[in-house]
Image (cartoon, rainbow, N blue to C red):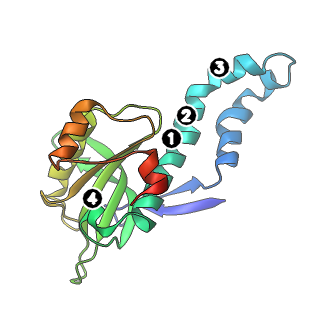
Amino acid sequence: MITHELDAFRANRSSYRIAEPLVTFYHAVMRPNWGALERPGRATAVWQRAQPTFLSKVVGPHFEELARQWARWHASPDTHAGHPALVASGTVNDPVGRTTHNVDVAVLGDPGNGRRTVLSIGEAKWNTTMTLGHLERLRHIRDLLTQHPTTPATQDTRLALYSATGFTPDLHHAAERGEVTLIDLHRLYHGT
């Protein structure tokens, strides 16, 4: 029911997550609206109000987990330029911007020297058509990770975008140039 997830980039940081989407749905959508749901004829109005919460708190995190599972167990080694030793989400510190960036899919490899390297970083979006802005964000995170003391990235670290709704033509052109790997629902369910 509950999973303990390690942060890919911070050894001392982890999080707990409800693993079952039905329980997540209950806590995110049903429980906060229980009073209104008990009244006859209010379910449609409650659902209209709760849909953004459902997409961001239930479907979005579940899609991110599906992307991580695919990256770990189903993607070919060519997708990440190596064999994954760990696939997790992670948080990257940005000291200049005084903020942190979340990485939905971090694929780490172990080259045999005991020090993990970042093979690929990715962002997963269920309900958003991905744009060049998403790719630029990943490039910035990759640049930050080149300075990371324990889990370094290089300019060869692959960038991946996972989307259920698709990608802009500019991203398709970037993928043709080898700048990004685009993973849609068809590839998640049928391809490597």
| Separation (CA) of disc 2 from disc 1 | 6 Å
Q: Which residue is found at the position 14% from the left and 58% from the top?
A: 146
- Which residue is denoted by mark 1 in the rendering? 60
Is residue 17 toward the left or the right of residue 124 in the image? right
Q: Which residue is found at the position 45% from the left and 67% from the top?
A: 73
| Separation (CA) of disc 2 from disc 3 | 12 Å
- Which residue is denoted by mark 2 in the rendering? 55
- Which residue is denoted by mark 3 in the rendering? 48
**Horizontal and vertical percent for residue 37?**
80, 25
Q: Which residue is found at the position 15% from the left and 41% from the top?
A: 96
- Figure check: 95 above or below 190: above
**Mark 1, secondary structure of its residue:** helix
Q: Earlier in the sequence, mark 4 or mark 1?
A: 1
User: Decide: marks 1, 3 in contact (CB < 8 A)?
Assistant: no
Q: Quadrant of residue 42?
A: top right
- Figure check: 133 above or below 110: above
Q: Amino acid at mark 4?
A: Ser
Q: Earlier in the sequence, mark 1 or mark 3?
A: 3
Q: Which residue is found at the position 47% from the left and 61% from the top?
A: 69
User: Decide: marks 2, 1 in contact (CB < 8 A)?
Assistant: yes
- Which residue is denoted by mark 4 in the rendering? 120
Q: Amino acid at mark 1?
A: Gly
Q: Confirm whether residue 125 shows in the render.
A: yes
Q: Confirm whether residue 140 shows in the render.
A: no
